[in-house]
Amino acid sequence: MSKSVYSGTKSFAIRGSILSYEQLDELADSDSLDTFVSKLKGTPYGDSLSDLQRPYDAVRIELALRRRLVKVARSMITATSNSKVLQAFYSKFLADNLKIILKGLALNRSYEDISRFVDLYAEELVGSRDVIVRVLASRRLDEAVSTLRSTQYGEAAETSVKAFNESGNFQVIDLYIDRAYYRTLLNGFLAERSDKRDLRELIALDVDAFNITSVLRAREWGLSPGEAEQLIVEPEFRVPRDVLVALARSETASESIAQLDKTPYSGLISQQDSSNPSWISMLEAAFEKLKLRAAKRTFTWDIFSTSEALGILELIEYEIRALAAIGFGIEQKIPRAEVMQKLSGYGSNA
C-alpha cells in the first residue's frame, strides 16, 4: 500500500470520529468537570484522559486532550514516510511550550506556576525532552535563550526576548515564536516532492493569516513599523509584501481595513468594525473559520494525499480548542448558550 493511500485511509477513518456540534453541545451540558470528563471517556479521547487524576481543572484537562493530537500527528508522520510538512506541524507542540515558558519567565512566574501549563509528552515521543526541561528550569529569560541557542527556535527566542525588553509587552514573544513555526511549515511545504497542489490552500491560508494578523498585532503591542515588517514570512501567497508593509505602517484601524480590502480576504472585517477595540480579534476569529472550512474541504479534494493528513490534524486541533473552551466554561460557570454560541463554527455538522 502506498504512503498516500495508507495516510488517506487513516485520515478518513479518524475523520469519522470527529465530534459533531450536537455532541459538543451535550458535553457542554455537563454540570461539573467530573461529569464532563466522564462523558469524554466515551469518546476517542478516553485513552488520553485515563491517567488524569482528580480534582480536575480545565488546564489539566486540555493538556490531556492534546495528547491525542500528539499521538495522531506521530502516526501520520509515519504513515506519510516522514512528510516534511507534518514534521513541521509537529514542531508546533514545542513552539507552544516555548511560548508559555518564555512568557512565564518574562512575567517572573515561578517554576511551579509555569510548569502547570506545560506538558512534555510530545517532546518525550521524539527524544527532545531534555532541552525543554532545561528551558523550563531556567530562572531568567537570558538563561532560557542561551539554552535554546542551538535549536530551531533559538534565533526566534533571542529576537522575541529583545523585542519584549524594548516594548515591555510580553505578548510579542508569541509573534516571534509563531513566525519561526510558520517559516518551518512553509519550508516543509516547499520541500515536499508531491501533493503541492492539494497542500497549497491549507498552507497559503495559514501563512496569509499569520502575516496579516502578526503585523497588526505587532503595531498594537508596541513594535515599530520596521519591526512589524520583519515578522513577514516569505514567500507570500495571496497577500503581496507591499500590502503587508502598508498594513505594518497603517496608523488606524480604518487604514488597515482599507488595505485588507485590496486582498482576497476583503470582507472578513468591515469599515463598520473599525471603531470596535477588538477588531483584530474579530479578524483572527474570521481567519480561524476560514481555516476550519479549508481543513474540512481536504476530504473533498483529490483523495489519498498529504493534505488530508494535515487536514485531519487541524480538525483535531480545532476540536480540542472547542473542548477546552467547554471545560473552561463549566469550570467558570459560564452559561452553556454563551459557550456554544462561540463554537458555532466547530463540529463536523456545523
Image: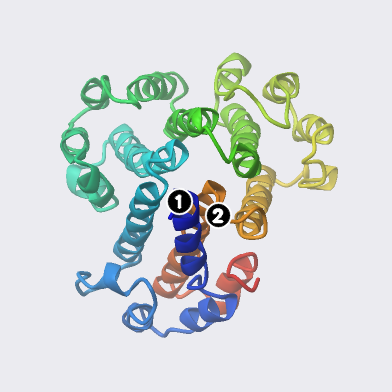
Residue at image point 28% right, 34% down: 105
Residue at disc 1, secondary structure: loop
Residue at point 58%, 81% (across, down) = 22
How far from the left and from the top, in percent, is residue 198? 63, 44
Asked whether 336 or 3 is in front, the reply is 3
Say which amino acid is labelled 1: Ser
Q: Residue at x 55, y 25 (%)?
A: 222
Q: Which of the 4 quarters of the picture holds residue 129?
A: top left
Q: Is residue 23 above or below residue 86?
A: below
Q: Please tell me in which quadrant of the rendered image residue 274 appears.
A: top right
Residue at 16% x, 33% y is: 134
Q: Which residue is mark 2?
A: 304
In the rendered structure, find residue 137 and report the number of the disc placed on it: none
Comparing 306 with 29, the one in front is: 306
Q: Earlier in the sequence, mark 2 or mark 1?
A: 1
Question: Mark 1 and mark 2 in contact (Cβ < 8 Å)?
Answer: yes
Q: Disc 1 designates what residue? A: 2
Check the image and report above or below for 257 versus 17. above
Residue that lies at the very extreme toward the top in this rendered image: 226
Image position of 105 (left or right of 243): left
Q: CA distance from mark 2 to mark 1?
A: 9 Å
Q: Amino acid at mark 2?
A: Phe
Q: Residues within 10 Å of mark 1 (few under 14, many from 20)?
A: few
Q: Is residue 7 left or right of residue 130?
A: right
Residue 63 picture quarter: bottom left
Query: At numbered mark 2, what does the secondary structure look like: helix, strand or loop?
Result: loop
Tell me the quadrant of the picture where the C terminus can be found: bottom right
Looking at the rendered image, the disc whose residue lies closer to the viewer, 2 or 1, is: 1
Q: Position of residue 165 (x, y in %)?
A: 39, 21
- Sort mark 2 into few (<14), some (14-19) or many (20+) by Cα contacts within 10 Å: many
* Residue 87 position (above or below residue 7): above
